[in-house]
Image (cartoon, rainbow, N blue to C red):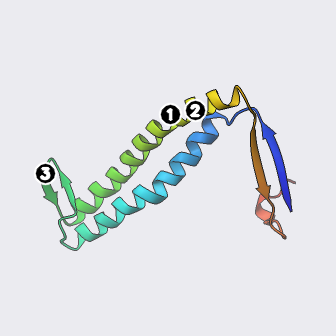
Amino acid sequence: MEKKIFINSLSAQSLFKILFIGHVFSIGLLITIMGVCSLFGYETVAIDGVSVVGLKGLFTAIIMAAVFSLILSSLSWIFIQFGNWVYTRFKPLTIIINEKDKPNRAHQDI
């Protein structure tokens, strides 16, 4: 079943959450994989042009993944939030919701 919802604008918090989750599971995951490679001796993580390997490389990659995800999400959020604001001045947004056949019981309101 498909439902359409017309909204004036996305909230800033919802938009940032969507962007942050997207960046964590894309660039964050890639950087973490590079950290795992660094754990096994590959020179995939570098700070100031100096390669970091081993456990230090893994921990550095995990911190880099979090920081890069936050920075990229913030920059994307600024531009997209502005575009969202301009667009919704002329036309409301339409959100299409596709419902599953059997809803997950953990997400049902009681």
Q: Earlier in the sequence, mark 3 or mark 1?
A: 3
State how far apart marks 3 and 1 are (Cα): 31 Å
Quarter of the picture containing the N terminus is: bottom right
| Secondary structure type for disc 1 | helix
Q: Are marks 2 and 1 in contact (CB under 8 Å)?
A: yes
Q: Amino acid at mark 2?
A: Gly
Q: Which residue is mark 1?
A: 79
State how far apart marks 2 and 3 are (Cα): 37 Å
Q: Which residue is mark 2?
A: 83
Q: Who is closer to the viewer here, 63 or 91?
A: 91
| Secondary structure type for disc 3 | loop
State how far apart marks 2 and 1 are (Cα): 6 Å
| Secondary structure type for disc 2 | helix
Position of residue 34 measured from the top left corner of the image (x, y, whole percent): 30, 65
Q: Nearer the viewer, mark 3 or mark 1?
A: 1
Position of residue 57 measured from the top left corner of the image (x, y, whole percent): 23, 60
Q: Who is closer to the viewer here, 104 or 1?
A: 1
Q: Earlier in the sequence, mark 2 or mark 3?
A: 3
Q: Amino acid at mark 3?
A: Gly
41 horizontally vs 60: left or right: left
Residue pictured at 80% horizontal, 40% vertical: 6
Give the crowd class for mark 2: few <14, some 14-19, many >=20 residues within 10 Å. few
Position of residue 27 measured from the top left corner of the image (x, y, whole percent): 40, 56
Q: Which residue is mark 3?
A: 49
Q: Who is closer to the viewer here, 8 or 61?
A: 8
